[in-house]
């Protein structure tokens, strides 16, 4: 019996560590006063109430309930710096390219002002974070409805651009 308790606890602790998966992101820009653009940060989004963006000097907590809009931005390809062709050991670096994706979040700050934060992260992490946001905040799911591109509704009234829209009354 004693032999089963230790491996079980070890596996359980390892599972908790994998679930608490912080992600390295880059703060691209926005209206956050403490952070400068192109700052490396760590994003924690495993809490059920808040997500947190931490830099070595600052920490920004964003409650899921205060997020009003989340948008996935363009996919950015990153490649390593070019090295001379005679360096054969750098061939794998030349072949492997990583992809990142930007995400823009609009949320109400502590003082009630609308704040915007744009971060770049790996593509899979962006998809995971977006799914987490839509699951934990209903407004994000409503604001990102696919039909808003095709139909005029009261939800997307601010995006109507006159006679050039696809759907007309």
Image (tube, helix red, strand yellow):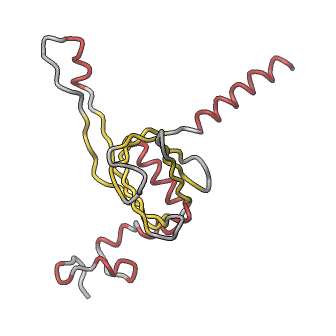
Relative height, residue 162 to residue 33 (above, below): below
Name, please, the residue furthest toward the left.
Answer: 85
Task: Please state the horizontal and vertical placement of residue 113, each as a whole percent of the image.
Answer: 46, 70
Question: At x 52% / y 68%, what residue is drawn?
Answer: 111
**Residue at x-position 41% and y-position 57%:** 32
Q: Is residue 22 left or right of residue 92?
A: right
Q: Position of residue 126 (x, y in %)?
A: 41, 48
| Picture residue at 22% right of the left edge, 17% below the top | 91
Q: Residue furthest right?
A: 1
Query: Is residue 168 left or right of 145 when viewed as pictured?
Result: left
Q: Residue 73: where, in percent of width, then height?
A: 31, 54
> Does 11 appear above or below 91?
below
Q: Is residue 104 left or right of residue 80?
A: right
Residue 10 rendering spot, x and y as whole percentages:
71, 25
Looking at the image, which is closer to me, 159 or 57?
A: 57
Q: Is residue 26 above or below residue 141?
A: above
Hey, which quadrant is residue 115 in on the image? bottom left
The image quadrant of residue 71 is bottom left
**Image quarter (top left, top right, bottom left or bottom right) of the N terminus:** top right
């Amino acid at each position: 019996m004693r032999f089963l308790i230790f491996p079980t606890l070890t596996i359980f602790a390892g599972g908790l560590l994998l679930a608490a998966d912080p992600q390295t992101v880059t703060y691209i820009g926005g209206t956050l006063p403490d952070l400068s653009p192109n700052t490396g940060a760590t994003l924690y989004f495993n809490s059920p109430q808040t997500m947190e963006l931490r830099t070595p000097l600052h920490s920004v907590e964003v409650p899921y309930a205060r997020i009003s809009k989340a948008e996935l931005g363009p996919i950015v390809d990153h490649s390593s710096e070019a090295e001379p062709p005679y360096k054969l050991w750098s061939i794998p670096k030349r072949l492997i390219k990583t992809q990142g994706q930007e995400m823009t979040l609009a949320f109400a700050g502590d003082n009630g002002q609308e704040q915007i934060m744009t971060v770049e992260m790996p593509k899979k992490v962006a998809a995971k974070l977006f799914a987490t946001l839509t699951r934990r905040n209903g407004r994000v799911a409503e604001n990102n409805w696919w039909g808003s591109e095709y139909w005029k509704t009261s939800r997307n009234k601010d995006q109507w651009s006159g006679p050039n829209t696809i759907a007309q009354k």
